Amino acid sequence: MPKAATTCVMDCPDTCALEVEVRPGEGGAPPEVVSLGGAADHPTTRGFICGKVARYHERLDHPDRLLHPLRRIGPKGEARFERISWDDAIGLVARRLAEVRDRSGGEAILPFHYGGSNGLLADGLLDELLWARLGASKLAKTICAAPTTEVARAMYGRIPGVAYEDYPEARAIVVWGASPKTSGVHLVPFLHAAKRKGAFLAVVDPRRTFNDGEADLHLAILPGSDLPVALAMIRRWERGGRLDRAFLARHVADGLEPLLAAADAWPLERAAAAAGVDPDAIARLADAYADASPAVIRTGWGLERNVNGGRAVAAILAMPALLGKFGVRGGGYTMSNREQGKLDARRVLGGFDWRARTVNMTRLGAWLTAVDGEGSAQADDAEPLAGDRHFPPDPPVEALFVYNANPAATVPDQRRVLAGLAREDLFTVVFDQVMTDTARWADVVLPAATFLEHWEVRVSYGTYGVGGGRPAIPPRGEARPNHDVFAALGRALGFTDEPFGWDERTAFDRVVDALRLVGKPVDRERLAAGLWVRPDFPGDNPIQLGPEGEGGVRPWTPDGKIHLAPPLLGPDPFVYRPPADRWPLALISPASRHRISSTLGETPAGELTATLHPADAAPRAIRPGDEIRLHNDLGEVRCTARVSDRLRPGVVELPKGAWRRDSRNGLTATALAPDTLNEVAAGACFNDARVEVERWDR
Ligand code: SF4
């Protein structure tokens, strides 16, 4: 059976090279994707992929797959639609967007999009040109990675991190706020290889995500307490004379004094009390990391999702600099490698200006409900919030265009998001592959092609390289690639920019030709064949602050130096704000084995389940399988209890990205998450949710 090469575009750091087995259609039937697997000759994919994407082709013909444009015929949210033609759909959407622009100004249009496709064609290309020409509101993409991105940029210029393949060189590995067993699974074999060579593996996470015997130390801290723990480790090193003063003098421009001053306030015992762990365990982690070389920290995104998150990221990223862990293969840190690929989309599109207000996506519910008239039930408590400077909205949002995203399931303060989507006066378009929770509230639904059905280019943010995507099969039904739909809308709105006339393959070629991978052009033919291109580092992979000629990369900051307390951290760069304690349990909502954020939520993952530690379940008389309710001031979620000591006491877990139908009352973890913002980069604070849990029969 023929196999097609392509690249996974899911919101996952691994960016696997895929092999797609396609059975040709017979007798007029469309070709079938029979299986998806990993390319054996890709350096990190190495012949396997995660279970989520191994079943991705089931989405192609899933009953929830969107095959035709639809127009709402019932009340909002009831998902009663009638089929319409593409011409009618494009005409209707273009007319309504133009009406809103002419009546209230372009900023009354809000495009909402995120990581449902991380390809360069499907997100941030022609769509941007369309929104710019309409003068639509801009979207601050803060749901994930805003603090980590901004802090890493300010401290190190987002230099490339330690490659997965170099982890076996490390003698100590700290996985901090990441869960490679669930997301980014291709790191795991390299962790195992390092362990076989005798490396010390520590994991900092409220949950035990590794099996017994896999990790040498599991520091199960309370959510949001990463900063005190990091500062206590730094204090221990400073007092123990462990700092690498020569490295600091050579490579660090500023920030050492405020960092050490802040750390001085965090003796082990104080940090241990804040984090709910044994002080000796923090000391053990600090000493094991300090003693080893090479040593690497793999930071994830779990540690940023609280009010202290940006500062915690800064303190943790300072560690390899403080101890001089850079300069050797396998030493340093890994966070996002997205900066390896650079594309100036505006140049590709011919240049354009877009001046408009910015809407923080984390506060979508507040934005949609802050209106006068129908749907304004919560307008009175609408308040400005640092990091959401254009709020309250003037003009209010009158048109919402959602693509690559499912905010009804993923955005904090879910009830307020749903209240906004229920507004009769809000014109909502959802452009997606399946009937998501958000699509059910749309006025117009547009069917999108999956990444197996369109051209794409994808820069990895975890592994090294860029991958090409070409259609393995034609789109099902009348589904269309993002490029085609934004081009059609641009033409229907009368915009004459040349890119609105490009076909998808032309857009692919233009993007590839303009893309630079660590400063160099990429091989268009390989990408057009669905294959990957690796950056050209001497020695195969970069060495952070390593020797030139051996893959060494200096900080990509303007002065080539490290900044330990950059200005974006604010005047008190390492201050710790303890969580509110009105509710007794911290709620976390990490990624699950079933979905990539909310993508693939159409495939049943079983009933929504909340996990508690036995010490929290017992006093509440909760047993496994009980029906329970989690609640706080924002709402309640009804689901089934699981009791497990893989989670630390004081914490309850609901999966990220669950769809509303998984829950017994149509609400999920985001119904309990506040829409407050991280003080650095205005990121979402999902893990600041605090709740009570009780049996439902009470
Ligand atoms: S989701 Fe991640 S691990 Fe799974 S196939 Fe895609 S890139 Fe690979």
Image (cartoon, rainbow, N blue to C red):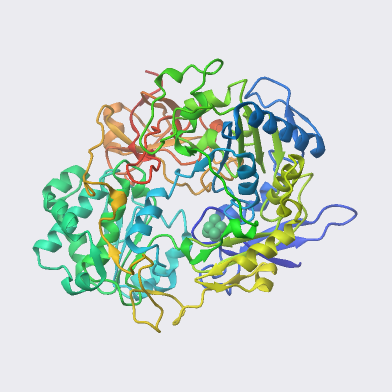
Q: Quadrant of ligand 1?
A: bottom right
* Image quadrant in which you'd find residue 233: bottom left
* Image quadrant in which you'd find residue 551: bottom left
The correct choice, above or below, for 55 with respect to 633 in the image is below
The outermost residue toward the right is 27
Left or right position of 516 against 86: left
Residue name at image x 37 percent, y 82 percent? 548
Left or right position of 526 against 333: right
The outermost residue toward the bottom is 549
Residue name at image x 14 percent, y 68 percent? 242
Q: Nearer the viewer, residue 21 or 698?
A: 21
Q: Nearer the viewer, residue 387 or 695?
A: 387
The correct choice, above or below, for 630 with respect to 6 in the image is above
Q: Nearer the viewer, residue 224 or 258?
A: 258
Point out residue 567 in the picture as x, y percentages from the top left corner.
29, 52
Point out residue 431 in the picture as x, y percentages from the top left corner.
66, 40
Point out residue 81 in the picture as x, y percentages from the top left corner.
73, 27
Is residue 492 something that shows in the picture? Answer: yes
Point out residue 240 in the picture as x, y percentages from the top left corner.
9, 65
Residue name at image x 47 percent, y 32 percent? 668
Task: State which quarter of the image contains the C terminus.
Answer: top left
The correct choice, above or below, for 237 with respect to 87 in the image is below
